[in-house]
Amino acid sequence: MLRTHTCGELRLDQVNQEVTLAGWVQRVRNKGGLIWVDLRDRYGLTQLIFEEESSEKALLEKAETLGREFVVQATGTVIERTSKNDKIPTGAIEIKVKTLKVLNAAKVPPFIIEDETDGGDELRMKYRYLDLRRNVVREKLQLRHKMMQETRKYMDAQNFIEVETPVLIKSTPEGARDFVVPSRTNPGEFYALPQSPQTFKQLLMVSGFDRYFQIVKCFRDEDLRADRQPEFTQIDCEMAFVDQEDILSTFEGLTKHLFSTVKGVELEEVKRMTFADAMKYYGNDKPDLRFDMKFVELNEVAKGKGFGIFDNAELVVGICAKGAAEYTRKQLDALTDWVKRPQIGAKGMVYAKYTADGTIKSTVDKFYSAEDLQAWAATFEAEPGDLMLILSGDADKVRKQLSELRLKMGEDLGLRDRNVFKPLWVMDFPLLEWDEETQRYHAMHHPFTSPKKEDIPLLDADPGAVRANAYDLVINGVEIGGGSIRIHDKATQQLMFKHLGFSEDEAQKQFGFLMEAFEYGAPPHGGIAFGFDRLCAIFGGSDSIRDYIAFPKNNSGRDVMIDSPSSIADEQLTELSIRLAVKE
């Protein structure tokens, strides 16, 4: 070993010991005849000291040549610091250096490698191997490591077996776009990279592996944002001989285990809510329950008073911001402009202030009497000091708009505390959703999700009303995981394919292997997949999953560090039987 200790472990107990450290130079402070060097490795930082009166001249001169990020080895004696630094664990000692060896000199880095850096996102992505030296980045990957270990520990204790599934699989049309890989040995044919191991984990249930899990890499060719990457990681799980309640209980247990062991947080009971209620009261299927501000529908008290914007709307709906009646006209105008942005799409906003003296002032006083506005307040269960914010329009659109406004108000009022965690199961999702572009129904989750038995007759009469045995785990407004009870018999699976618009030939070509497997004794089964990167971001208090991935892609799906994707040589294209015809 080139070191006897790391840069994070020496304390006063080791004073007078001779030690050897190795690491990177964080910074050099030269006071003329007295040089301090901060030496850093993965474990921490230790101060080295070189003094003119006690060091050879050659040693002092060598120390003077050190620059940021030089890799060095230093041997010396541990001494007590006269001026201690209580901000670092090694701040009570320093190393009086006797020998110094430069293992590798370094160019001046393109940005400062400290917690507070001067490097922008793209620059740090280009030099990601340098960015990973920063404490704040390394700590995120250490958190990810801990969560992986604790996941495996819990799953093993629950008798799950970790099984690897193939990465080169078959392309399917449902869901996001596939990444495809040409086959050299089968010209004109392609593998796909898995969006999830869905069919394989179901086949493992047919195989008798009644409890499977895998921490698995998945791939989706979709537009990127803060919580998406083209390649991401799932905790993928499946169980046989279970019902929905068994799955919810098991993975509620995993969630509580991770919070307890990794965050030291004991989660409360996980609440449950139907999809229909989530949409009605919060406007989305992943409500943030850290604050209340439920939607209140006002059609009965707001319509029929001559205010055309409300009278002609399908839905008049609002939220009550507790204690926000002191918002100024300027703040309210800014809120109105915010909801009218193209990203939100509202045509305007009506507000009513319930002032401390009990009167209500609104932007529509000429249409509504004081009694009318008191009826609004009663419907909202508002109190003096509250602010009522109201939108109107087509029901589906206005709920989405109000959902965004609710989240903004929660943020502005400081109600979305990153140290508070409110988990929620959202259940009873629609089985199918209508797609205007293709003019047909698509599976809301995937084609293997089981419909509720009592709703199967509705598949012909009212497909959109059929509920699925599906469930999502939501934490603080972020979908962390989702799953379902699966179809496990051929007849029901064929019925599902039919209602998704598959011909018998198409279904056979794409999923014939699965339907045939069902004929060999498939047990009832179901499962869930957690977005592991998103889970890490929630634990770390971040909005972006990119910070928890060692080598992420940028918003264009590029790895700017290795310059990928890139073109390949003509010889490779010929070998793959591919001719390029790239559109301009």
Image (cartoon, rainbow, N blue to C red):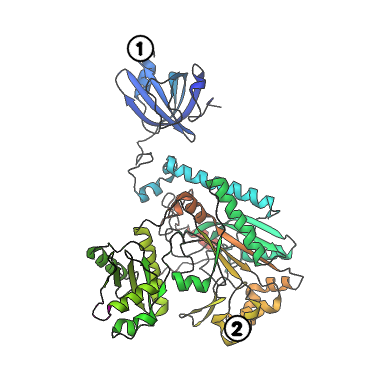
User: Where is residue 523 drawn, in percent x and y?
Assistant: 73, 68
Q: Which residues are magenta?
A: 363-369
Q: Secondary structure at mark 2?
A: helix
Mark number for residue 459? Answer: 2
Tell me the SS state at disc 1.
Answer: loop
Q: Is residue 150 magenta?
A: no
Q: Is residue 64 above or below residue 267?
A: above
Numbered-mark total:
2
Quadrant where the image shows the N terminus? top right
Residue 584 shows up from this direction: no
What is the crowding at mark 2: few (fewer than 14 residues within 10 Å), some, or many (at least 20)?
some
Q: Is residue 233 above or below residue 512?
A: above
Answer yes or no: is residue 146 visible.
yes
Q: Give, as a three-letter code, the residue at label 1.
A: Glu
Q: Position of residue 109 (x, y in %)?
A: 36, 38
* Front-most of residues 304 and 230: 304
Please give the name of the residue rendered at 60% of the width and 83% of the height, measured from the top-left corner. 459
| Residue topped by disc 1 | 53
- The structure residue drawn at horizontal position 65% and vertical position 70%, both measured from the top left corner, is 486
Whole-percent x, y for residue 510 in the image: 63, 73
Label 2 or label 1, whichever lies nearer to me, is: 2
- Asked which quadrant contains residue 532, the reply is bottom right
Q: Position of residue 256 (x, y in %)?
A: 58, 53
Viewer-proximal residue among 525 and 515: 525
Q: Nearer the viewer, residue 233 or 366?
A: 366
